[in-house]
Structures are given as structure tokens and as C-alpha cells.
Image (cartoon, rainbow, N blue to C red):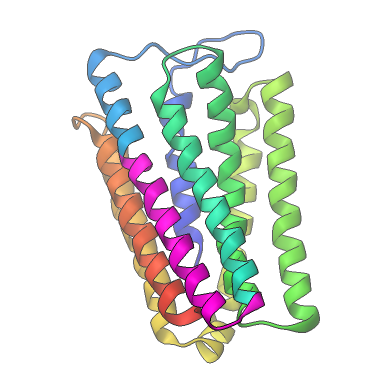
Amino acid sequence: MLCEAIIGSFVGHRRGAKGEGETMKGNSLPEFTREERRDDVMSAVTHGIGFLMAGAFLGLTLWKSIADLSARRIVAFSIYGACLLFTYLSSTLYHSFRQGRTKNFFRLMDHSSIFLCIAGAYTPIILVPYHGALMVSLLSVIWSLALVGILLKAVSFCWGGLNRTEIISVTLYLVMGWMSLALAPSLVMRVGWGFLLFILGGGLAYSAGVYFYAKESMRYNHTVWHLFILLASSLQFTGFFVYLT
């Protein structure tokens, strides 16, 4: 169910890694052409829009949850919204800067935010419909994996370069994402097919965007990819708001 997030997290950062120069810490970035720089600027703008969308979604879900006096939903959507805001902000800032230490730092934030985004998306999915020991166990597992992933990124950034742990990171992304398939039958029973369809629709949007991202010969392909991410996020927003608030 969260496989769409995995697809995005894996391919969405290839460009930052592609063609990197070899330095002591392996975190340098390639020089961009003028067209690539324009694509970078538009990518920053699109995810800046995503940041505003995430803020609006957070406001709507909190307003509805507070009106319903639902502490569980307030906590769930606050965590999800904060993680999504951080993810979009990190991407926006990463694409906003040229070469240098600042861009490298935001590259680390961009990579690390993937784990927060995945765990944040799980939070309302688990916290709202599930209860008791099962809820605590599921949240503990997913957030523990996210923290391990973030620590791995930080350590590799400081002592080896982000690319050197790419295989481990992608494996962890996949494990976290595919775990959601085990929840699909119970989610249909607890929430309904409609919710599942919105989540799957988001997955299809991410998957369609992958085609454009991989088509490097296409002008501004990264910006088009970001537009598909916005579409996927919108579908997920709608599913959460309609079925979990």
C-alpha cells in the first residue's frame, strides 16, 4: 500500500547521485547544465506548492478532528502532516540551492525525510482504525525502522557518502513499504474499500510519474515527476480526510 512511497523514494533521488564526483566523503554533486538548473528551479517550485498543500491538509484534518473531539485523530494527523511538511520542505530547499555544503546538507535532509514520510503516512493508517497492543506494536516497528534508516543516512553522510549505503537504504524502504500489504485485508474490514482505492490510486500516480523521471532525454522530466508526486499526495490526502476523519 505504501509501495508508491517506496518507488518515489528510490527514483526521486537518483539525479542527485548521478555523476557525483569522488571526494573524501562522497557527497559532492555534479555541475548542472543551464536546462537542468531550470528544471531544478521548477522542481523547487512544484514541491513548494506541495508544502503549501500539506499545510492546508494539516489544517483541514486538525479542524475536523478538533471539532469531533478526537484526540487520537489530532495526534495521528499532526504527526503525518508534520512529516509531510518536512519532506516537501527538504525537497524544495534541496532543489533551491546550487552546489556547495548547503545543498549537500539539504540532500541529507531530503534523503532522511523519506523515512519520516513513510512512517508518518503509516501513523494515521494504524493509529485511527487499530487499538490496543496491535496498534502499539505496529507503530513501534515502523517508527523504529524509520529511526534506524535516518541514523544510517546520517552516519553514511559523515563517514562514507550517501551513495555507499544506497542498497541498504532501498532495502529498508522496501521492507517498510511492503509491510503494509499485510494490513490490507483488515483495513478493508475496518475502513472500507474506498480508502484502499484512494491509496492505490496514489500508487498508480507515483508509478506513472516514474516513467517520466526515468526518461532523462525529455526536457524538464524531473518537474513532470514532481507533478505526479503532487497528484499522488492529493489522492492520499483525500482518502485520509474522507475515510479517517
Figure disc tally: 0
Asked if the stretch drawn in magenta spans residue 31, the answer is no
Q: Position of residue 52 (x, y in %)?
A: 38, 49
Give the farthest residue toward the left.
Answer: 219
Give the farthest residue toward the front.
Answer: 67
Where on the picture, by quarter, is residue 36?
top left
Majority secondary structure in the magenta region:
helix
Q: Is residue 207 visible?
A: no
Q: Is residue 214 left or right of residue 160?
A: left
For residue 21, above or below residue 150? above
Query: What range is drawn magenta here?
Result: 46-71
For residue 85, above or below residue 152? below
Residue at 22% x, 32% y is 220
Q: Position of residue 216 (x, y in %)?
A: 27, 31
Q: Is residue 152 left or right of residue 81?
A: right
Residue at 54% x, 44% y is 86
For residue 38, above or below residue 165? above
Q: Is residue 206 visible?
A: yes
Residue at 49% x, 71% y is 63
Where on the picture, by quarter, is residue 238?
bottom left
Q: Of 87 and 185, which appears nearest the observer?
A: 87
For residue 230, above or below residue 48? below
Q: Position of residue 118 (x, y in %)?
A: 57, 55
Q: Position of residue 12 (x, y in %)?
A: 42, 39
Residue at 32% x, 27% y is 40
Q: Is residue 58 left or right of residue 24?
A: left
